[in-house]
Amino acid sequence: MGFPGIWMTESGTVAYRVVPKCACSTIGQILYHSDHGRFYDGDIHDASEGLWKWSMEERRAAIEDAVFAPDVPVFTCVRNPYRRILSAFFDKICGVQRNGNRYRGNLVPKVMQLYGVEVDGNFDQIASFRRFLLFARDTILFRKPMEPDIHWSSQSGHVATLIANGGRYDRIIATEDFEAGMRAVLSDFEPRHPVELAALPRFNESSGHGPERAHPVEAYFDDMSRHMVWEAYRRDFELFRYDPADPGRAAPLGEIDLGEVHRCLSD
């Protein structure tokens, strides 16, 4: 299986496990800048140079060596499950992607037809999101009507692939305290070029794809919605210390226990 989703600096100084919808565009740009002293001109997901990725077959041996090297820190980044699934809805379901098309071709029409989701005009955001949430829950728990998409499949599932293949994380940071987390990551190795975290440009590639969120986060989740999110993301809540009872609380309840993460995800 190897190490899917791993990005690494060309210099081999640090390795990162991508978790979609968890600041991955910004993190990729930070890693690129740490090697080259500039940011990549475009979407870092499209970069075919300047950053090594597991998807580049010719780089896999070097990435595998780095994952097991004791002097190469390995990290990832997680996000509050309520906010992540809401972000996936507005970006991937409501939004038009940068190629001018809907995400994954017939995905959105299928969700509209089967689950009654609306995405056009002045639609009811709360009602449509809750219908999408039912669809996402079905894909995660029952693999129907399709396999879950990487943007709403569980974070623990993404994080686990590295552990299952013998790797270990040195840090797991939270998007809700991103600057402090990335400062700690950058202290674990010696970047070729310093990165001014407090002055980062905006790298949210999904920004502007879809409509603006019209309500506070907690308004989208009634009792049934919270139950579905708990069903789909129970392990994410437990391992990454987020509060399942309060969708309005973004920050984790406490520090992530790396030992617990490795024990639970090594099965």
Image: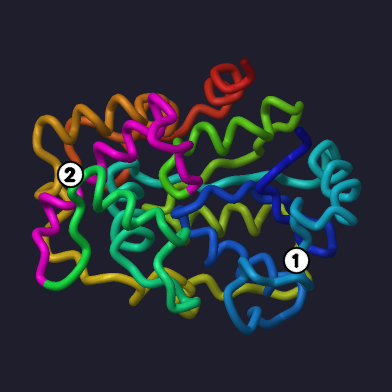
Q: What stretch is highlighted in magenta?
A: 122-150
The crowd level at tag 1 (other Cα within 10 Å; few <14, some 14-19, many 20+) is many
Q: Position of residue 31 (x, y in %)?
A: 67, 65
The crowd level at tag 2 (other Cα within 10 Å; few <14, some 14-19, many 20+) is many
Callout 1: SS: strand
- Compared with residue 147, is residue 239 higher up or lower down, i.e. above or below? above
* Residue at image location 63% in from the left, 19% down from the top: 266
Left or right: where 231 falls relative to 196: left
Q: Is the magenta stretch mostly helix, strand or loop?
A: helix
Q: Report which residue position mark 2 lands on.
A: 130
The N terminus lies in quadrant: top right
Nearest the viewer among 169 and 98 is 98
Q: Position of residue 63 (x, y in %)?
A: 83, 48
Q: Where is residue 221 in the image (x, y as percent from the top left)?
A: 14, 42
Left or right: where 91 falls relative to 183: left
Q: Report which residue position mark 1 lands on.
A: 51
Q: Where is residue 10 in the image (x, y as percent from the top left)?
A: 82, 64
